[in-house]
């Protein structure tokens, strides 16, 4: 208690608490956003691998990655986006110039720009990135 009998916080003490809270909140929010993006990338890779499995099953039955009409097949529902339901974070597609009777390349392109860019996966299992600014191991995993 001071000599006037009042207790409380000074404006300087209050502003220090607000500043510390703001700094901690900004760090927590940026960490959370990066965690969400990493989860979206993992989901995109999973759908890409499912689409590759679908292509391999087609090849086992038809002896070709192309459709019966010789055209590039359309991915079935649930494999054309990631996550499989809800708002798309990555669009999954067969690369038109890279799909042939004995070869294909799948792409998972982010809907919103991402440091990992577009994930690629081909018929040999080779993984790649297009337009990435992050290291390969950070995007595809170790």
Image (cartoon, helix red, strand yellow):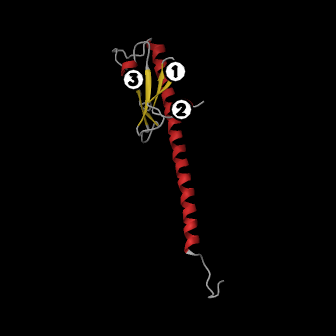
Check disc 2 and report the residue beneath it. 135
Check disc 3 and report the residue beneath it. 95
Give SS at disc 2: loop
Check disc 1 and report the residue beneath it. 126
Instruction: Looking at the picture, tell me which residue is in the foreground, 17 or 66.
Output: 17
Give the spatial CA distance, label 1 vs label 3: 14 Å
Residue 77 drawn above or below residue 53? below
Instruction: Looking at the picture, tell me which residue is in the foreground, 8 or 100.
Output: 8
Give SS at disc 1: loop
Residue in the image at 58% along x and 75% along y: 10
Image quarter where the N terminus lies is: bottom right
Task: Report the disc number at residue 139.
Answer: none
Residue 60: x and y, percent?
48, 14
Residue in the image at 55% along x and 44% along y: 35
View extreme (bottom): residue: 4
Front position among marks 2 and 1: 2
Instruction: Looking at the picture, tell me which residue is in the foreground, 128 or 135.
Output: 135
Give the spatial CA distance, label 2 vs label 1: 16 Å
Front position among marks 2 and 3: 2
Give SS at disc 3: loop
Q: Residues within 10 Å of mark 1 (few under 14, many from 20)?
A: few
């Amino acid at each position: 208690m001071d000599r006037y009998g009042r207790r409380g916080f000074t404006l300087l003490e209050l502003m220090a608490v607000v500043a510390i809270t703001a700094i901690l909140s900004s760090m927590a929010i940026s960490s959370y956003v990066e965690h969400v993006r990493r989860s979206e990338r993992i989901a995109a890779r999973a759908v890409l691998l499912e689409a590759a499995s679908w292509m391999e099953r087609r090849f086992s039955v038809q002896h070709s990655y192309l459709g019966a009409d010789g055209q590039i097949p359309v991915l079935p529902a649930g494999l054309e986006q990631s996550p499989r339901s809800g708002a798309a974070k990555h669009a999954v597609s067969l690369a038109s110039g890279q799909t042939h009777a004995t070869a294909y390349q799948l792409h998972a392109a982010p809907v919103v720009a991402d440091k990992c860019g577009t994930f690629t996966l081909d018929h040999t299992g080779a993984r790649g990135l297009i337009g990435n600014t992050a290291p390969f191991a950070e995007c595809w995993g170790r």
